[in-house]
Image (tube, helix red, strand yellow):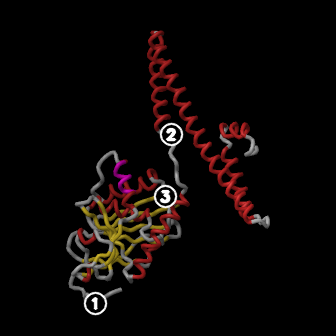
Amino acid sequence: MSADDPDRLDEGLANGETHAVVSAATERDGDAGRTDTGDPDADRAELAGLRRENVRLRQRYEALREGQYRRTAVALAALGVAGLLGGALFPPVRETLVVLGAIGLFAAAVTRYLSPERFIPVGVGASVFGAHAGNHAAVVDELGLQDATVYVPDADRDSVRLFVPEHRAYALPDAEALRDTFVVTDDELARGVAFDPSGGGLFDEFERSLDGPLGDGPETLARQATDALVELFELAGAATAETDAADGRLTVRVEDCRFAAAETFDTPVASFVAVVVARGLDAPVVTEVAAGEEMDFAVTCRWEVGGDEETETEPSADAADGTTETRRETENADPDERR
């Protein structure tokens, strides 16, 4: 089918053949960009024309798709009205016709107002997020900060901040200090940087989708978080959780991760799990992400179970299995011990 034949083009679009047309135009676009005719002006003009044609075809496809949904909605509504009228005219089959009429009207409403939205390909989203994650990681690296990532809830703002400390034996800043990007306090141990975690927006969507309250225990939070990762956001093909409330530990093993990777700074899957745990327990959460052989990676969240001790988290030898060893350091630790 030629893109220059308007009649055949409209017929092809109506029959769902537009992807082939758009792809063909795109391929021609690319070929034109690679062909050297010896006349740069002519090549640029041809390339501009092909791009305009590609845009026009996409716009026509969108218009035809929206028109198809509208026509389907009108047809379903007409069938619904006919069913209700038939119920009034034919009493012996009234119940059946009324039910069919109600179904038709409901389907028409759903088709009209819940038609598919535009989606951004995963690759596009990952590339955009990767740039921001890379910038954050560069800030952390150039400032010589620690590898620790602490997700701290801010009850006054119903949010969570990601704190990256300067010292190994760190102290957590107060909520007001964490609202700044560069956290510079009188207490040298409480200095570092703070970001809005990538899982914050995901948590907002997750919270709106809940049919009940957010859990307040590790097991409930683990179940809610893994269900959301797989079923709601489809960020992972599978996610399994293991909790140890007495030790203050929750580990989520992720398989077939579809967005970012274990080495990505504040990778969305780990960030979302940490935000869920921090909000649910209303406690700071230290997170470790470890790649594995039989899975993409494991996210281990740790929190304090009583006491006012400072926390330093380091990966253990079996970190590939998603477990970590946690070492406690008191507030009396030598403030000069860094990195």
In the rendered structure, find residue 74 and report the number of the disc placed on it.
Answer: none
Look at the picture and state if 107 lies above or below 276. above
Main secondary structure of the magenta stretch: helix
In the rendered structure, find residue 336 and report the number of the disc placed on it.
Answer: 1
| Stretch of the chain drawn in magenta | 202-208
In the rendered structure, find residue 236 and report the number of the disc placed on it.
Answer: 3
Which type of secondary structure does the marked residue at label 3 adopt?
strand
Residues marked 3 and 2 touching at CB (< 8 Å) = no
Q: CA distance from mark 2 to mark 1?
A: 60 Å
Q: Say whether disc 2 or disc 1 marks the residue closer to the N-terminus.
A: 2
Q: Position of residue 268 (x, y in %)?
A: 43, 63
Which type of secondary structure does the marked residue at label 2 adopt?
loop
Name which residue lies at 49% across and 34% down.
112
Q: Say whether disc 3 or disc 1 marks the residue closer to the N-terminus.
A: 3
Q: Which residue is mark 2?
A: 115
Which of the two marks, 3 or 1, is nearer to us in this view? 1
Give the crowd class for mark 1: few <14, some 14-19, many >=20 residues within 10 Å. few
Report which quarter residue 310 is drawn in.
bottom left
Q: Is residue 53 magenta?
A: no
Look at the picture and state if 154 lies above or below 51. below
- Report the side of 281 relative to 96 (left or right): left
Name which residue lies at 71% across and 63% down.
33
Q: Choose between 251 and 212: the one closer to the eye.
A: 212
